[in-house]
Amino acid sequence: MNIVMIGLGHMGGNMALTLQTAGFTVIGTDVAEVARRNMAARGLAVVGPEALPAADVYLLSLPSSAQVREVIESSPGLLRQAPKGSVIVDTSTSDPVVSRELAKMVVEAGLEWLDAPVSGGPAGAATGALGMLLGGEASTIERVEPMLKAMSARYTHVGEAGSGHVVKLANNYLCAAHLLTTAEAVALAMRAGVAPEACLAGLNSGSGRSAVSEVNFPKWVLPAAFDSGFTTGLMRKDLRLARDAAAGMGLSLDLLSRVVEQWHANADALPDSADFNHVTDEILRLAQADGATSTQEAGQ
Ligand code: NAD
């Protein structure tokens, strides 16, 4: 199977190398010359974005639907350039409404479509251990199954085109909310004199646990590592997409609106470029302020 990887950033670059190591023929491209150079230095064949070769699969890992639309419609324009029967797989976290529109155009042009957003970060992409949510035809999934197996630890077909992207937004909404709620839960325990590590151990043995309490806090928040490879800007984009998707369907979700608001509240202190786990900073700082008094109170 010949694969062209479009977008060689944190995720796409690692996916391309994983697939190459697994034995697929992979050629990568990116609008950023530095990204192409980096990947060439790591042994990937790269081409400029206007020189895409014919392939069985065009695998996209791009910032948002705007770039996915551009790549498909105009520059380089996969609708015109991709050979009939080839498959476009969008692993970006994209707007499901746009994905459904693009999927229709792709199928009308004689190509096949799969939305395949991922979880697991750059580390999951580098080790073929991603979680993937698939939207599209079962027959398309069957065609690209060897590639999906090489990239992921688990993939789940959740429905027709666009469904993978809807469920990905639902997933990221929960992750964003869990970062806030888990930080508040840890702050509550810290104020009462409980060490955050002990609090986490307790939460992870109970029904309040989540991937955030089991992975994000021990790996990135408590050791102040903040090198997850996923930025606050990307999470803000995903939250806006989730809010807009709900609004577009006339669905009023109060808590979702408040989570979106809180993630956008402190843009000066928390720039888009910051690791997304930094959203817990302000809440955990609250726990430390006046901590001595509160600890004494807790002991009374
Ligand atoms: P990134 O910014 O590191 O990489 C995106 C790459 O796309 C960049 O190298 C950029 O130059 C390139 N690009 C932009 N426009 C292009 C175009 N028109 N043609 C070719 N290349 C183009 O982003 P990332 O962290 O790799 O994320 C990619 C996607 O995966 C996003 O949609 C993100 O929401 C999603 N995602 C990221 C993570 C993560 O942990 N980083 C996890 C899950 C999902």
Image (cartoon, helix red, strand yellow):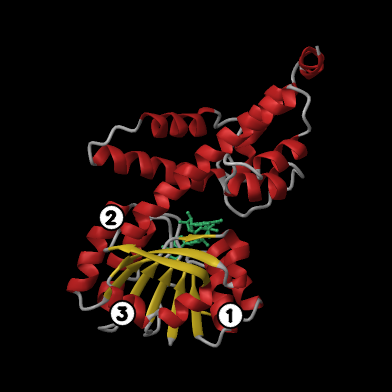
Which label belongs to residue 98?
2
Placement of 63 over or under 46, stated as above or below: above
Counting from the top left corner in percent of width and height, residue 249 is at 23, 41
Q: Residues within 10 Å of mark 3 (few under 14, many from 20)?
A: many
Which label belongs to residue 44?
1
Placement of 162 over or under 14, stated as above or below: above
- Is residue 274 visible in this depiction of the protein? no
- In the rendered image, the quadrant that contains the C terminus is top right
| Amino acid on which the number 3 mark rests in the picture | Ala
Which label belongs to residue 82?
3
- In the rendered image, the quadrant that contains the N terminus is bottom left
Question: How far is the residue under mark 1 from the one under mark 2?
Answer: 30 Å
Q: Residues within 10 Å of mark 1 (few under 14, many from 20)?
A: many
| Amino acid on which the number 2 mark rests in the picture | Val
| Amino acid on which the number 1 mark rests in the picture | Leu
Counting from the top left corner in percent of width and height, residue 137 is at 27, 72
- Is residue 294 visible in this depiction of the protein? yes
Q: Quadrant of residue 40?
A: bottom right
Identify the secondary structure beneath mark 3: loop
Mark before the other along the chain sequence, 1 or 3: 1
Question: How far is the residue under mark 2 from the one under mark 3?
Answer: 20 Å
Q: Nearer the viewer, residue 75 or 27?
A: 27
Placement of 111 over or under 208, stated as above or below: below
From the image, state whether disc 2 or disc 3 is nearer to you. 2
Residue 67 left/right relative to 263: left
Give the number of callouts: 3
Q: Residue at (43%, 86%) from the top-left corner?
A: 2
Q: For ligand 1, tell me if the residue under mark 3 lies within 8 Å.
A: no
Identify the secondary structure beneath mark 1: loop
